[in-house]
Image (spheres, grey):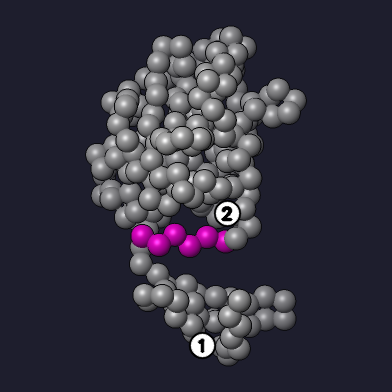
Amino acid sequence: MSTAILQGGIIEFDDGLPGFEKVRQFVLVVSPSLDPFTLVQGTGAGAPSFLAIDPRLVDAAYASPLAESDRIRLGAEPKTPLLWLVLVTMGADGRATVNLKAPLVINPGAMRGIQLLAPDSPYAIDHPLPPV
Amino acid sequence: MLVFTRKRDEAIIIGDGIEVRVLRVGRDAVRLGVTAAPHVPVHRREIYDQIRQANATAAADAGALSEIAARLRRAGPPAGGDAS
């Protein structure tokens, strides 16, 4: 699903993100100069932003299971299309990694999002970012 | 911190209906069952801390991230796939 349709709209993260629990509203910024990355921008003074990318561009077979309780937190039905993004981190060595273990999952229909914490996720928290 | 002594199959209630029940007591581990409404996130502490650390490292201001994106885009050819 394209992030472009969400451009500018405020997405509510009711629980914030771990470490940023008080930042509850984010907007997605997409632009030709960022593509294929998306800027996940916290709203409000001093709120953090994150660089994110579609996990399927990192691992074409990426599929993280979504628990029923997480679906409910997103206000989503089983067939509701969801947007998945993973956060990019620049390492001290200048290499970029992506957090495939805890993706952002967004329900565009409800403009609600969560950061998924799946304890049994097979994915790495610091998966190397392939060339984009 | 509130401290309780609970036996197997005994529970505590937190707030409006969050129940934590002792299911099994072993030598080095206790098995707990948590019952909460679906919208209440329940996580293992160490996983939460791990993701918190990762988020703190990933967070930056939007300007710096735009520069990083530009640098990463220059670093390699398109990976393919539908980025739209």
What's drawn in magenta, residue-wise? B39-44
Q: Residue at x 51, y 35 (%)?
A: A46
Q: Which percent across, then down, holds residue A78?
A: 28, 49
Q: Chain of mark 1?
A: B
Q: Amino acid at mark 2?
A: Tyr
Q: Is residue A116 visible?
A: no
Q: Nearer the viewer, residue A101 or A21?
A: A21
Answer whether residue A56 is magenta in the image.
Answer: no
Q: Residue at x 32, y 27 (%)?
A: A8
Q: Residue at x 60, y 88 (%)?
A: B5
Pick whichever of labels 2 and 1 is earlier in the sequence.
1
Q: Nearer the viewer, residue A108 or B16?
A: B16
Q: Which residue is mark 1?
A: B9
Point out which mark residue B48 bears.
2
Give the residue furthest to the front: A45
Cα distance between the residues tagged 2 and 1: 27 Å
Horizontal relation, residue A49 to residue A8: left or right: right
Q: Which percent across, then down, holds residue A54?
A: 45, 29
Quarter that holds the N terminus of chain B: bottom right
Quarter that holds the C terminus of chain B: top left
Q: Quadrant of residue A40?
A: top left
